[in-house]
Each structure stands twice: as C-alpha cells, then as structure tokens.
Image: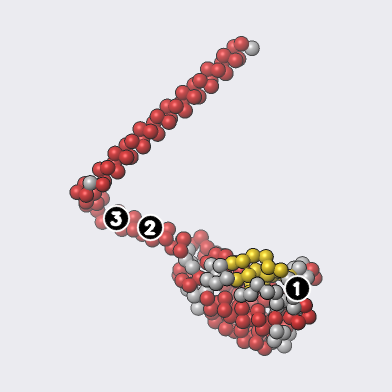
Amino acid sequence: MKTIITVAFVAITLTSCKKFETNNQNTRMQEDMDHSTTIYENGSMMQDSAKMNGNMDHNNMAEKTEDAKTTVTTKQGDINLQGVFSSYLALKNALVSDDANTASTSAGVLKNAVEKLDKSKIPSEKSATFNDAVADMEEHASHIIGKAGDIEHQREHFALLSKDVYQLAKDFGAGQTLYKEFCPMYDDNKGGFWLSERKEIKNPFFGKKMLKCGEVQETLK
Ligand SMILES: [Cu+2]
C-alpha cells in the first residue's frame, strides 16, 4: 500500500514538473515572438523582409484575407435578396386577403427575383444550401403562378417556400425586421410558419377564415 502511494506521489510530482517545464517553454516562445515583433517594427527590416519574400507570397496573403472577408460579410444586399423578400411579402399578403390572382402575379415577380440572385457572391460553404433553396423556390413559385384558381394549392406551396426564404434570411440577413410567425393548426395541426413584416398576426394559410390564428416565434433582422 505504501509503495502504491509513493509511486502515485512521484507520478504527481513528475506531472507537475512536466507542466512547469511546458509553461517555461511557452514563456520562452512568447519572448521569442515578442523579439521578432520588435524586429518587424523596425521599418527598414520590414521592407527588406518583404523584398526577400517576393511579390508572389505577398499576393497569396492578400487573396487569403479577401476570402475570409467574403465569408463573413456576404449580406442580402450583395446577392440582390431584397427583391425576393419584397415579392415574398406581397405573395403572403395576397394569401392573407384570399386573393389567388394577386398571389399568382406576386409569385411571378418572386420567380424573376430568384433568377436574378447573384450566385457568384455566395461563399463556398453556403453554396449547397443556397442552390437547394433557389431550385426549391423556383419550383414552388411556378406552382403558385399556375394555380390562380386554387388558393389552397397555392398555400401548400407557400408553406414550403417560406422555409427557403427563412433559410436565406438566416444565412444572409433580412436587411429589415421580419417576424417568423407560426400557426399550429395549419396542415391538419402539424403547424406551419411564414415570414411577415408585421408583428400583428394575419394568417396567410387561412385568410379570413382564421385571420388571427398564430404567434410570433422569432424576430429576424
Ligand atoms: Cu403544386
């Protein structure tokens, strides 16, 4: 028993020592880094170093910085998303008013806006979801355009379309305040959501039959 305790004690001591050594090393590395910073702060040394590295390296560095910037700052304005949001809201308001003809026209405007989105600005890690959303929106818009005589059918496609528009607003920003509103009774009580420019509930799934049914789930900016 005594041996085990001793071994354990030695082990702890060794671990602590190793940790201390590592810490010491880090401090030394930090000192080295500080030192090199001092060198680079000297103007002439920095110029020499740039000459030695040559222009190729310098250009590579510039490109990398540019990539990182695009990932962070691609916003709805950069890809012309604003037209998608405004025509989506017009479509939503037409369904609120039980107006299938205006819904059909607005879906036409939406389809054009989707086709005008600037795909070249989409960062690579978002391009798969973006392309899916675009293909989906074009399909649902086409159905809504062609079904001016069948508002319930339009509403089914509007519910699916809303998921794509929501995804785009999350990925690139809404550029305005949009409310995600949920109706628990839609689709045989499975529920469904839409986006609105107003906090006040006006239900596009039921129109005047159940205008006030729903609740705000999320606020998007
Ligand atoms: Cu359809």
The picture places residue 109, in percent across and down from the top left corner, at 57, 83
Query: Which residue bears the numbered disc 3?
Result: 58
Which of the two discs, 2 and 3, sits closer to the camera? 2
Dot 2 crowding, Cα within 10 Å, few <14, some 14–19, many 20+:
few
> Quick one: label 1 or label 3, which is nearer the N terminus?
3
What colour-coding does the image apply? secondary structure
* Residue labelled with disc 1: 213
Q: Nearer the viewer, mark 2 or mark 1?
A: 1
20 displayed left or right of 167: left
Residue 105: mark in rendering: none
Q: Which residue is mark 2?
A: 65
Please say whether residue 78 is visible from this viewpoint. Answer: yes
- For the residue pair 147 and 21, the one nearer the viewer reads as 21
- Name the residue: 48% across, 62% down: 124
Earlier along the polypeptide chain: callout 2 or callout 1?
2
Residue occupying the point 25% across, 43% down: 39
Cβ–Cβ under 8 Å for marks 1 and 3: no
Q: Quadrant of the C terminus?
A: bottom right
What amino acid does circle 3 point to? His
